[in-house]
Amino acid sequence: MKLMDNKNIKKLTLLAIWTALTFVLGRLFTFPIPGSAGNILTLLDVGIYTAVFLFGKREAAIIGGFAAFLLDLTAGFSNYMFFSLIIHGGQGYLAGLTRYKWLNFLLSLLVMVGGYFIVGGLMYGWGSAIAGLWVNIVQVIVGFVLAKVLSPLIERTGILNGFRKA
Amino acid sequence: MQNMLMGRYIPGDSIIHRMDPRSKLLVMIAFVVIIFLAHDWLGYLLLVLYTLAGVLLSKISVSYFLRGLRPMIGLILFTVIFQMLFTNGQHVIFSLWFIKISTESLINAVYIFFRFVLIIFMSTILTLTTPPLTLADGIEKGLGPLKKIKVPVHELGLMLSISLRFIPTLMDDTTMIMNAQKARGMDFGEGNLLKKIKSVIPILIPLFVSSFRRADDLAVAMESRGYQGGDGRTKYRQLKWQSRDSLLVVSIIIMTILLILWSKVS
C-alpha cells in the first residue's frame, strides 16, 4: 500500500483547520447591523477570501462551503445549512475563477447575495429575502477588504511557505 | 459551545436517535422540497402532523424546539408582516393609505409562517438527535458514489471531522489572543462599525498564524503515525442502515404521493 505523501497530509490538515478558523470568524466576530430583521454581519467571508488569495478557488470553495455548513448546523440555522454549503462554496470558487480580480469579486458577491436572496425568497417569501440583502452585501465587501489587507501580512509571516497554490 | 463535537445534540434513546444519519438527512432535504407541494390548509395539516410525529417520536421536550426558533424570530416576524402587507387580494378587510390587508394576504401570511416553523422544526429534529460528527460520517458515506467521478470523499469527510474537533480549540485561542491584546491596551467594541472592524486585525493575524502552527503539528503527528486514507481504511464508528431507516424513507415517499394527489384533486 502506498503511503499518502506528506504534502497531501499537510494540505488536508491545513484546509481542515482553515475551515475551523473560518467557522470561528463567523461565530465570534459578529457585528449587529440596524434594519436587518435579525440578520447579523459576520467575518465568515474573511476566511473564504484569504483562502482564495493564498491558495486558490477549489480550496476556497471547500473552506467556504464547509465552514458555512457547520456554522448553520450548530448555530440553529440548520434549515439553511445545505444552501449555505452550496452558496458559500460557490462564492469561494467564483472568487478565484478568472484572471480579472474585480470580475471575480463581483461574481462571488453576486452568487452570495443573490443565492441567499433567491433561496430566502423561494422558501419564505420575498420579504425575508429583502431583509437579508443589505447585510449580505456589506458582509461580502467587509470580508473582501479585510482579506485583501490580511493576506499579504499572513504571507509575510512565512508560515505558508511551500504551500502556496501547490 | 464548550463541546462542539456535540453541537446541539441531546442524548437520548428514541427511535429517531437510533436512525442512520443518512436516512434523516435524506428525509430532511425531501421535506424542504415537498413543502412546496402544499397549497391549502389540508396540505399544511398533513405536513404539520408529519412534523409533530417526528417531534413526539424523538422524545425531546418541545421547549428545545421552541428555543430553536429563537434566532429566527426577527426574520419570521418581518416576513409574515411583509407577506400580509404586500400580497394583493380581492377581499380587502382593512385598508389605510397604501396598506391593504385582504383575506388572501392574511391566509398567505399564515402559510408562510407555518412553512418557516415546519422547516425549522424538521431541521431541528435532525440536529437535536444527531451529533455533528455522526452527521459528518453520514455525509461522507452518503457521498460515497461520488468517488467514481474522482471526488476525494474520504478526505473531505476527514476534513469535516478535523474542523469540528478543532473549532473549540481555536475559540479558546481567540479568547486568549483577545485578552493578550487587551492587556497591551487594545480597545474592542468602541466607536462606529468601521472602527470596530478595523480593531479585529490585531486579533486575526496571530489567530491565523497560531492556527497554521496547529495544522502543521497535526500533519506531523498524522504522518509519523503513518496515516493513509482512502480504500481499505477501517472506521471506529460504523453506520448501519436498518429497517427503521427504510421505513422513514417510505414515510416521506407516501407523504409526497399524498401531497401530489391532493394538489391534483383540489
Image (tube, rainbow, N blue to C red):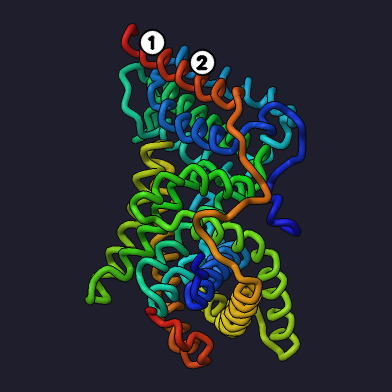
- Left or right side of B50 for B56: right
Residue B151: give x, y in percent of width and height: 39, 55
Camera sees residue B203:
no
Q: Same chain for the residues at labels 2 and 1, yes or no?
A: yes
Q: Chain of mark 2?
A: B
Q: Quadrant of the C terminus of chain A?
A: bottom left
Camera sees residue A82:
yes
Question: In what element is the residue under mark 1?
Answer: helix
Q: Amino acid at mark 2?
A: Leu
Count of marks overlaid on the render: 2
Sequence-wise, the earlier of marks 2 and 1 is 2
Residue A94: give x, y in percent of width and height: 31, 64
State the residue in front, B63 or B51.
B51
State the residue in front, A164 or B70.
A164
State the residue in front, B52 or A135.
B52
Q: Which residue is mark 1?
A: B262
Q: Which residue is mark 2?
A: B46
Residue A149, by quadrant, is: bottom left
Question: In what element is the residue under mark 2?
Answer: helix
Which residue: 51% across, 30% down? Answer: B27
Residue B225: give x, y in percent of width and height: 65, 72
Which residue: 31% across, 71% down? Answer: A96
Q: Chain of mark 1?
A: B
Q: Are marks 2 and 1 in contact (CB under 8 Å)?
A: yes
Up-down: is A158 above or below B25? below
Crowd tier of the residue under label 2, counting other residues whose Cα lies within 10 Å: few below 14, some 14–19, many 20 or above: some
Up-down: is A3 above or below B14? below
Q: Amino acid at mark 1?
A: Trp
